[in-house]
Amino acid sequence: MGLAIGVCLVSGASAVLMVSVPEPNDGPDATQETSAEGPVGEGDPDGSRRHPAGSPAETEGAATDAAPDASPDPSASPTEEETPVLLRSVEDEVDTADGDIRVMKGESEEMGEGPLTTFAVEVEKGLPGDDSDFVEAVELILGDPRSWGEEGDRSLQRVDGDDADIRVLLAAPDTVDRLCAPLNTNGFVSCANGNRAIINQNRWVAGVEDFEDDLETYRVYVINHEVGHTLGHGHVDCPGEGEPAPVMQQQTLGLQGCEANGWVDPDAD
């Protein structure tokens, strides 16, 4: 069923665990979704999109040592501290990273009302940027009333056990391609596989052309979209010219006349 990985997260200081990701088996059945449909996401079957070439990183290997503390640097300048959470760690795009998954240690308060859904945040070792920025962004997005709380039908909480309901992983394009197979993500898009939302680092730092310069909205969208798949939601189309795009529309590949939108319920309080 995919990969066994511990769970994550942090509130202030962040400890991390590192787990090696095994190579998938050959053949189309190598990765399996919890549903019968297999990995889902904004696949690119014609291979028309591809990330730019980057610097090669270390080859994948096992690692068990604790990673450095991912807490924010107390010496950060006022300008850095004032950068909104959803616009932090805007880094260069990459092709590969180390292949090891770091599970962010810690947990948050329960956010929202209703039956609890837990989630962990994971980051591939070797990516540029501050891991804690991604952790804080995921928590901020999923804890927002406009996300998957669905008007009190669900509460969400970051946890650090191995039984999290959802895992949200930031990974390099080559790792995304491997973990999303047999879906063709072609180094460009993200996907969901089983209970894991797999976010392509290039999309996280650069967004897509149709969102113009609105990286904040794109980041909200890509987290909510892929987490939506882990909750069992499939793709939908734009309902009409000029309307907000549904979060489960494949907005990375085009807006179909809709307006870019990252929220499940943009009007929620």
Image: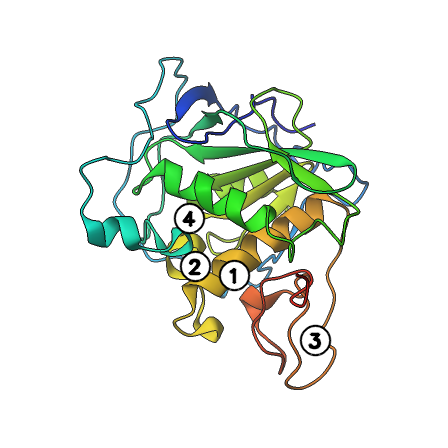
**Would you name the residue on which mark 1 appears?**
47
The label on residue 238 is 3
Q: Are marks 2 and 1 in contact (CB under 8 Å)?
A: yes
At label 3, which amino acid type do we have?
Answer: Cys
**Would you name the residue on which mark 4 appears?**
201
Q: Is residue 127 visible?
A: yes
Reply above or below: 100 against 238. Answer: above
Query: For the point 62% across and 20% down, which residue is it?
Result: 162
Q: Nearer the viewer, mark 2 or mark 4?
A: 4
At label 1, which amino acid type do we have?
Answer: Gly
> Please, what secondary structure does the residue beneath circle 4 have?
helix
Reply above or below: 10 against 88. Answer: above
Position of residue 216 in the picture relative to residue 79 (left or right): right
Judge the density around disc 4: few (<14), some (14-19), many (≥20) Cα neighbours within 10 Å: many
Q: Nearer the viewer, mark 2 or mark 3?
A: 3
Query: For the point 80% across and 40% down, which residue is it?
Result: 35
Judge the density around disc 1: few (<14), some (14-19), many (≥20) Cα neighbours within 10 Å: few
Q: Earlier in the sequence, mark 2 or mark 4?
A: 2
In this rendered view, identify the residue nearer to me: 21 or 220: 220
**Would you name the residue on which mark 2 appears?**
50
Q: Quadrant of the N terminus?
A: top right
Q: Earlier in the sequence, mark 4 or mark 3?
A: 4
Give how far across and how far down residue 255 sits, in percent: 59, 75
C-alpha distance separating marks 2 and 4 = 13 Å
> Please, what secondary structure does the residue beneath circle 2 have?
loop
C-alpha distance separating marks 1 and 3 = 23 Å
At label 2, which amino acid type do we have?
Answer: Arg
> Please, what secondary structure does the residue beneath circle 1 have?
loop
Q: Earlier in the sequence, mark 4 or mark 1?
A: 1
To which quarter of the image does residue 74 belong? top left
Position of residue 103 in the picture relative to residue 236 (left or right): left
Judge the density around disc 2: few (<14), some (14-19), many (≥20) Cα neighbours within 10 Å: some
